[in-house]
Image (cartoon, rainbow, N blue to C red):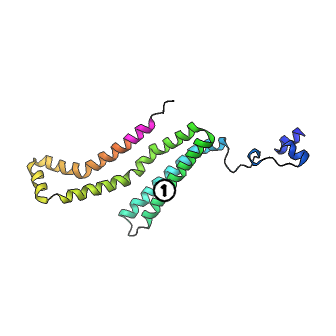
Amino acid sequence: MIALAEYFEVTTDWLLRDIEPPAAQTGTDAHMSPAQAKAGAPLLLCLTLGGSACGLFLLFYGRFVSASTIPSTIGVILQIFAIAMAMGFGLYLKNSVDAEQGADFIRTFWRVEIWFIALLPLRAIYFAFMQLLNLIPEAVLSRLWTSLPQPFWELGRVFLFAGVPVILYLAVCLFVTLVLCRRRRK
């Protein structure tokens, strides 16, 4: 009886008395096994990051190339879906399979994802900064620029309009990446 129960992957109570085991003991759990979850983590990480990158591409394509807002909308939806999927799987790993592996999955995802997602809020901050510069009277700005020697004048304009956003983007992304690279101490 024991050999039959092991072969058919059922309990001896089911074979002898026709008593079904509780749902938690059956092998028909709707969730994946811990081995499947651990094996699928790198693939899901690549798929979610790739989906987020495609969403970013669609977002900028819709903003700068396309005449409609449909690609931008699809890009934002794709990024939200990729983040939700990665966070859901990371929390599943953390709560059901292996807490350390789940935390590592989430940290690894955000180490890369911050480089995609930070472009959107920093772009909004850049446009707000440009609107603030438009509030400064033109006479004040031209006196500021023309008071500098000519090479510095050009470098100052380039730094102000292009360098500040790039430095801000790099600082935010590097800070988040470095913070997430540190392991938590137990």
Pick whichever, 139 or 46, lies toward us.
139
User: In which quarter of the view is residue 167 placed?
Assistant: top left
Counting from the top left corner in percent of width and height, residue 102 is at 56, 41
Mark 1 neighbour density, 10 Å: few (under 14) some (14–19) many (20 or more): some
Q: Quadrant of the N terminus?
A: top right
Say whether residue 149 is left or right of residue 181.
left
Counting from the top left corner in percent of width and height, residue 151 is at 13, 47
Residue at disc 1, secondary structure: helix
- Residue at 66% of width from left, 47% of height from top? 32
- Magenta segment: does it hold 184? yes
Q: Amino acid at mark 1?
A: Ile
Pick whichever, 139 or 75, lies toward us.
139
Residues in magenta?
175-186
The residue singled out by tag 1 in the image is 80
- Residue at 53% of width from left, 40% of height from top? 103
- Residue at 37% of width from left, 41% of height from top? 174
Pick whichever, 3 or 65, lies toward us.
3
